[in-house]
Image (spheres, rainbow, N blue to C red):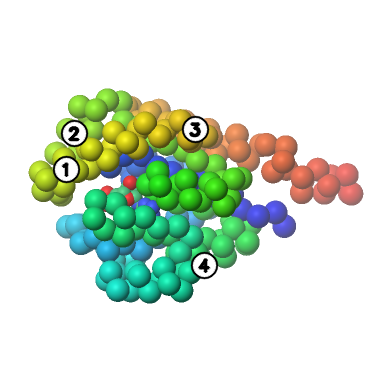
């Protein structure tokens, strides 16, 4: 059995990653989502264990020491990290997985797993990004400004990614994302099982 594919998704805060991804999962329910461990406070409406496991700084640092994370980073003053075990288990079972992480975490994973497919969700403009962060109403103005500063650096690093999806019109962005998944599945290198199965029948 061939291993599952790992899709790394990044994009600045406010680019609409979560909205795009939740639609992509409607089209591709067989793909799993990696739940990150984070030390930032839970926002209203967030559910423990849904997108994030909210844990203490001490527990996070223990995970680092025990080498339980595939990657981790500090983002606007808080730790964010991808637990190793669920990702390895999923890929070893031949299932695909999406991880949504920042550009530093993505670079760490690409270095160790160059076969991972990286996708950058781009906002249509900076003013759209600022509007989305403000209208979301979940962060203080200080945090919004810090997120915007980080966003500049992140967008400058979009060239490190295999694909760019511009999230201007949500429907188009979702279709672009799904097209990437379909194309990756059709790559010859991913179809060796089918080739040998047909030859051997
Ligand atoms: P937010 O606080 O808005 O949920 O996320 C802030 C940033 O952290 C986003 O860019 C998001 O992609 C990133 N992020 C979420 N989970 C992880 C993770 O496990 N590792 C890393 N490196 N970044 C993450």
Label whose residue precedes the other's in the sequence (2 or 4): 4
The residue singled out by tag 3 in the image is 163
Label 1 close to label 2 by CB (< 8 Å): yes
Residues packed near mark 3 inside 10 Å, few (<14), some (14 to 19) or many (20 plus):
some
The residue at the point 16 percent across, 40 percent down is 145
Question: Is 51 in front, or is 102?
Answer: 102
Q: Position of residue 37 (x, y in %)?
A: 36, 63
Q: Position of residue 20 (x, y in %)?
A: 37, 40
Label whose residue precedes the other's in the sequence (1 or 3): 1
The residue singled out by tag 2 in the image is 130
Label 4 close to label 1 by CB (< 8 Å): no
User: What is the secondary structure assignment of the residue under circle 2?
Assistant: helix
Label whose residue precedes the other's in the sequence (4 or 1): 4
The residue singled out by tag 1 in the image is 144
Label whose residue precedes the other's in the sequence (2 or 3): 2
Q: Residue furthest front?
A: 65
């Amino acid at each position: 059995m061939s291993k599952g594919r790992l899709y790394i998704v990044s994009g600045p805060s406010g680019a609409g990653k979560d909205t795009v991804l939740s639609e992509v999962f409607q089209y591709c329910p067989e793909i799993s989502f990696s739940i990150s461990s984070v030390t930032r406070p839970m926002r209203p409406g967030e559910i423990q264990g849904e997108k994030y496991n909210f844990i203490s700084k001490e527990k996070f640092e223990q995970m680092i020491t025990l080498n339980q994370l595939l990657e981790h980073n500090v983002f606007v003053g808080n730790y964010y990290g991808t637990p190793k075990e669920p990702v390895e288990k999923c890929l070893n079972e031949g299932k695909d997985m999406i991880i949504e992480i920042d550009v530093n975490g993505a670079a760490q994973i690409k270095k160790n797993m160059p076969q991972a497919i990286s996708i950058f969700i781009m906002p249509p403009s900076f003013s759209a990004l600022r509007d989305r962060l403000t209208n979301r109403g979940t962060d203080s103005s200080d945090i919004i400004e810090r997120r915007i500063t980080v966003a500049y650096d992140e967008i400058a690093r979009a060239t490190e990614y295999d694909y760019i999806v511009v999230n201007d019109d949500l429907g188009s962005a979702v279709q672009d994302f799904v097209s990437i998944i379909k194309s990756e599945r059709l790559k010859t290198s991913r179809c060796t099982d089918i080739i040998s199965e047909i030859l051997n029948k």
